[in-house]
Image (tube, rainbow, N blue to C red):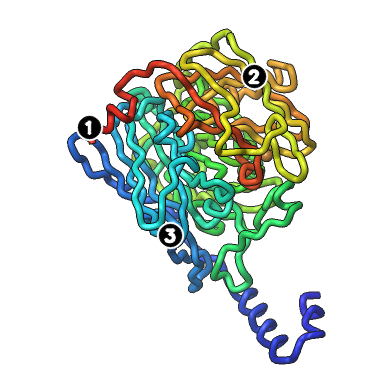
Amino acid sequence: MQRRKFLGLTSITALSLIIGTNKTQAAEALNQALPIPELITPTDINGIKHFDLDIQVAQHEFYAGIMTETYSISSTYLGPTLLLTNGDKVSLNYTNMLPEETTMHGHGMHVPGEMDGTAHQPIAVGSTWSAKYTVNQRACMNWYHPHYMHKTAPHVYQGLAGCIIIEDDESRALDVPQRYGIDDIPLVLQDRFFSADKTSLVYNPSRRQINMGYIGDTFIANGAIEPTFEAEAKELRIRLLNGSNSTMYNLGFTNGKVFKQIATDNAFLESPVSMSKIVLSPGERAEIVVDLTNDMGSALVLKEFNYNKTFLTVNVSKEATDITTTPNHLTTLDAIETPTVQRVFRLGMNRGEFTINGKSMDMMRIDERLKLNEVEEWEIINDMGMNHNFHIHATHFRVISRNGSAAQVRANEKGYKDVVHLAGNERVKFIVKMTDVTADDANPYMFHCHFLEHEDNGMMGQFTVEGNTNTSFFPSIYNLLF
Ligand SMILES: [Cu+2]
């Protein structure tokens, strides 16, 4: 079939294309161990942890012997893991060495508007922008990625994303796996299209793909194609991130092995939830613990079942060097409060542009004005027949109903979330309260669909938060510390 296309071409062109095709067939995925993103050591300056990060053009080996051009953060694809402790004073210093402007947003980070890293805080070519704040939230895994107007999707696609692990006293005291790279691993799940010669990542979605998902034919984990991880015969904690642009992942082990979800986007669950499949929409995180104690010598395949792809093979090949026994009680979450404000957000489309409440994103328009410490109920209504999700910056929410029913809220979405999935024509209600940090008209927060093609094509809005903050989190005063 492929060759028929060449019939009308000159023989030389056809020959070169055929050679190109053969070369493509010869390209083999690098047979490799799962890359574990580096944990970089910050520089302590006057009690502030400085992380220096270079956003750059790079070359990454996905296929044996072939270098693929990427964007990355102080790496060859993706970026290092930033390990933060609740209460840390940090300065994430991003230097833009790309040939174009970008931004770097801390997804899930509870920070003031001017430190949020959205399109309102662009990083000019050759310049450095710093996100400075005091970490003030529970243990979880967040992530950093660009948030540039109309270009979030292509920038993330080229490789710009990294994990932020937050620890606190409670997480450190829990008997859960927490040896990074040994029994506690981040897993950034993505899918990509490569050029025929594998030297570049191809971002060129059609109108249909913008709507229905730009779903690559090659699935990657931490920037590797079907890598393997050598695990100890004990509990293994995997911090899953759906880092794709717009793909729903339905994950599980091919042997049906049951695992426990211990954390949602922004915190531990109160108790682990047992499951054999987990669905994650773009931007969502889930920490799972799989008990490999009795699996010595076996290989477990972590698979994506919607598209029948392998993400990772876990070889249980090492004796346990430190036993953990994940407890049945993990944390106590704050009680869900009674709302005093209601808002409705309808996800739709108008003249080819995605909309929220009939409006496409406008950086000059503030869509909602919130007050600090006011308890709000937001209803998100998906007016379309396609998948969407909904993400709010700088905070977490608690889902209280799905399609009008509290019983339809899944056991594993009862924790702190910052992204919630809505299948076609679904609706969700959640309770949200902004605390500690504010955002003004010049540096507002955003809410949006995290299917990046939808976000880039209008499905996003902006909100401010007004009120008196604790000055220790207020950057203009806090900046004096730097
Ligand atoms: Cu969407």
**Residue drawn at x 76%, y 52% as measured from the top left:** 208
Q: Is residue 4 left or right of residue 223?
A: right
Kindly identify which residue carries mark 3: 98
**Residue drawn at x 50%, y 16% as measured from the top left:** 371
Say what secondary structure mark 2 lies in.
strand
| Nearest to the observer: residue 340 or residue 2 | 340
**Residue drawn at x 52%, y 57% as measured from the top left:** 158
Residue 3, image quadrant: bottom right
Residue 403, image quadrant: top right
Earlier in the chain: of badge 1 and badge 2, it is 2
Single out the residue that lies furthest toward the bottom.
11
Residue 62 coordinates in the image, percent (x, y)? 51, 64
Residue type (three-letter) at the residue carrying disc 1: Leu
Say what secondary structure mark 1 lies in.
helix
Kindly identify which residue carries mark 1: 481
**Quadrant in the picture for the N terminus:** bottom right
Q: Residues within 10 Å of mark 1 (few under 14, many from 20)?
A: few
Mark 3 near mark 2, Cβ–Cβ under 8 Å?
no
Q: Is residue 242 left or right of residue 13?
A: left
**Residue drawn at x 33%, y 30% as measured from the top left:** 475
**On screen, residue 365 above or below 18:** above
C-alpha distance separating marks 3 and 1: 30 Å
| Nearest to the observer: residue 211 or residue 184 | 211
C-alpha distance separating marks 3 and 2: 39 Å
Earlier in the chain: of badge 3 and badge 1, it is 3
C-alpha distance separating marks 1 and 2: 38 Å
Kindly identify which residue carries mark 2: 343
**Quadrant in the picture for the C terminus:** top left
| Mark 3 Cβ inside 8 Å of ligand 1 | no
Residue type (three-letter) at the residue carrying disc 3: Leu
Earlier in the chain: of badge 3 and badge 2, it is 3
Residue type (three-letter) at the residue carrying disc 2: Arg
